[in-house]
Amino acid sequence: MFEGYESDERRRYPRKQVSHSTNIMSAETKNVLGECFLTNVSGSGVAIESDCPFSIGQKVLIKINILSDVIVLAGEIVRTDKGFFDPLYGIRISEQESVNLDVFRSYVSHQLN
């Protein structure tokens, strides 16, 4: 499912590999559902591994601290797959509901190799 994303130059926001652990929260209640591990990111989505069960269409929040900024990515689960340790979930970022998305996109584009 996620194969080929790294080499597909036609993407508006190319995927970058990361290794970052953080919490994943319910978009409705803002309650922490559990931990997740970001495996790759782009300006339009992220892939996470988590032992929390999620379903397609579920709305979630991921809070990330980048340098001195707090990023809150709001998104929707759009894919599921087998991950390395836990199930892998693809999340499409919601532009209207995310906080500091411009900072996140700038960091992904300019700071990650």
Image: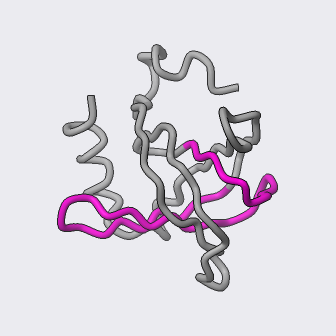
In the depicted view, which residue is nearer to us: 106 or 24?
24
Query: Which colouring convention does the figure follow?
Result: one colour
Residue 66 among those drawn in magenta: yes
- Residue 89 screen position, x and y as percent: 68, 45
- Residue 110 occupies quadrant: top left
Q: Is residue 80 left or right of residue 75?
A: right
Question: Which segment is the magenta one?
Answer: 47-76
The residue depicted at 32 percent of the width and 64 percent of the height is 65
Q: Is residue 92 left or right of residue 11?
A: right
Quadrant of image for the N terminus? top right
Residue 18 among those drawn in magenta: no
The residue depicted at 41 percent of the width and 38 percent of the height is 18
How many marks can you see? 0
Instruction: Decide: is 30 above or below 103.
Output: below
Q: Is residue 12 visible?
A: no
Quadrant of image for the C terminus? top left
- Residue 108 screen position, x and y as percent: 30, 42
- Residue 35 screen position, x and y as percent: 59, 62
The residue depicted at 63 percent of the width and 46 percent of the height is 49
Instruction: Decide: is 65 above or below 90.
Output: below
- Residue 24 screen position, x and y as percent: 58, 66
- Residue 29 occupies quadrant: bottom right
Q: Is residue 7 visible?
A: yes
| Magenta segment, prevailing SS (helix, strand or loop) | strand
Q: Is residue 109 left or right of residue 4?
A: left
The residue depicted at 65 percent of the width and 57 percent of the height is 76
Q: Residue furthest front?
A: 85
